[in-house]
Image (cartoon, rainbow, N blue to C red):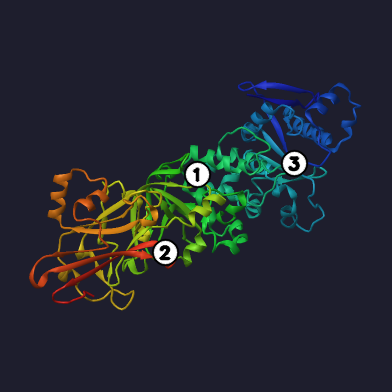
Amino acid sequence: MGIRLIDTQSLRMKWFMDGNIPHYAILSHTWENDQEISYQEMIAISENPSNPAAEKRGYAKVVETCQKARRNNIAYAWVDTCCIDKTSSSELSEAINSMFRWYQQAEVCYVLLADFDAASASLRAALPKCRWWTRGWCLQELVAPPRVEFFDARWNYIGLKIDLASLITEITGIEEEVLTDSSLIDSLPVARRMSWAAGRETSREEDIAYCLLGIFNVSMPMLYGEGKKAFLRLQEQIIHTSNDLSIFAFHRRSLTNNLNSSVNSSRPYRDLFATSPRDFMGCRDLVHTRMEVHWNNAFALTNKGIHFRRAELEVDLRRGLYCMLLNCQFSDSESARMYLRKIGPRLYVKYDEEDSIQTTSPAGVNYCEDPFTTTEEEIYILPRVTRSIRQQLEYESDNAIYVHSRTHYLCRALQVVQRSTSSDRWDHARMQFLPKGEKSFGGYWKVFPSLAKPIDGGNEVGNGSSSSTMPSGHFYMLCGLDYSGGDVSGMRAWVRLHSVEEWRGLEKKLGIMTNLNEVAHLTGGPRAQDQITLGSGSSSLKVIATIQLDISERPRYKLELDFQNERNRELR
């Protein structure tokens, strides 16, 4: 790829290939409707100086830019209006993908502030009012060039970027260090860089994405007419080249969520990607919490969603949600995070942060005395929540089997068996299996009674020494939905309890057990209630498991555990 430059002496254009590009000056300005000069008009003027296009104010900008460059002993200049043949889609696409580099390699960038009020009482009062700060394309034209000179409408000198850096930082939120050294851009969180464009606009909807390519050091083809998809493609392209999790941090205090706050309570599920840079308005103070962003876990875009082979998640048992820390924080030391809800096998959806405050787990008291734990899982996150998906999500918990106890915290007592085919349907945050979509479902746990802490006084942990009254070791608890009749309306929920010795005997007899419904039929049939006794004498423990339909909200099945022993009929 080369570049087309204007000879500052003859005002004729010449083409230079990469590797043979001379020194040049470059212009940054805001466009005026019907006054800018095109490549074709520039050619026409060079052939006929009396061409009417020479009367446009845009041509005067070109002439003055060349004069400034010539006085600085720079033989060539570049102006965006006429140095790109915009009738050629291929040339336009290549130019947009190269533009950041062109500004970065310029000897000097002249910024023309056509609406700067020279009569203003002070520079500090006049400079922030200029329209130039609100235009999308002007962002890279500010950041990329090492030397930037500002001029008013009459080309009177205002000052240098390096000398005005402190004031420019106040206006734009861009760090002084970045203004003086554009190579530092990559060290900042993606969300923070996005925030620089939060208050900027472009004439064409797609350009708000295209003008940011250089800020993120990515390339992509121009597809005018794609509308908002351009900004989505930009975020996808960033993900291809970076594992910076801050790209998902836009939800905090974002303009979009504030505008949609009236529907948050009824529509808590969110798209994974932002709709525009405005969504990142609250991220101007974001900083990395890890010294090297590449230490973050890898993630990639797939046709199922964003895939994390190993995601570190906090399990919030009170809200029934998962929290992914995004390894960055705000100036008030609050960590940036993303809330998720599990909706299927390894499948998650982003959950609105404001709604998460009001959300409680449907399993009631199944959270622990410490309602937070951590897990590492392979997960997929839905990138978009369309209307049809939103409708399906209203029923995502239908026929779920959630585990409950009126007397004990169970979260640490249940260990889902990972080698089972149903383990990826276990939703730890809501203490439930998600069998939706399965014609025949079965899941099972190892249950460790000594880890079931008693509930005393509602949600407070009692002073009882459960470890001394509960026997050590574990047993197996199986549950499932039986469609053996072939009719969904005749579905039966069942539960079975087996000692370790019984389970080993079953494994020896049946081998690897993948169909737990068959196991239930071979061991006495599906039951709505089962019990097991552990230990003997006064220290024996009876465990009773009961499963029944719960239609208080959506149709689900409650699997309730009751612990009893001889010394205390119901442990508390």
- Distance in Å between CA atoms under marks 2 and 3: 51 Å
Question: Which of the numbered marks, if any, corresponds to residue 29?
Answer: 3
Residue in the foreground of this view, choosing between 487 and 227 = 487
> Can the viewer see residue 184 in this picture?
no
Helix, strand, or loop for circle 1? helix
Residue at the outermost bottom position: 457
The disc placed on residue 531 is none
Tag 1 or tag 2, which sits nearer the N-term? 1
Q: Secondary structure at mark 2?
A: loop
The reply to whether residue 530 is in sight is yes
Which is nearer the N-term, disc 2 or disc 3? 3
Residue type beneath disc 3: His
Query: N-terminal of the two: label 3 or label 1?
Result: 3
- For label 2, the crowd category at 10 Å Cα-Cα, with few meaning under 14, some 14 to 19 and many 20 or more, is many
324 or 478, which is in the foreground?
478
Q: Amino acid at mark 2?
A: Arg
Question: Where does the image place residue 431, in percent across and percent down from the top left?
Answer: 34, 60
Label 3: few (<14), some or many (≥20) within 10 Å? many
Which residue is pictured at 61% across the width and 56% down the height?
A: 256
Q: Which residue is mark 1?
A: 187
Residue beneath label 2, please?
A: 319
Instruction: Give the camera-side residue of 424 and 402.
Output: 402
* Rendered image quadrant of residue 251: bottom right
Please name the amino acid that badge 1 sits on.
Ser
Gap in angstroms between the C-alphas marked 3 and 1: 28 Å
Image quadrant containing the N terminus: top right
Q: From the image, state whether disc 2 or disc 1 is nearer to you.
A: 2
Q: Position of residue 410 (x, y in %)?
A: 28, 64
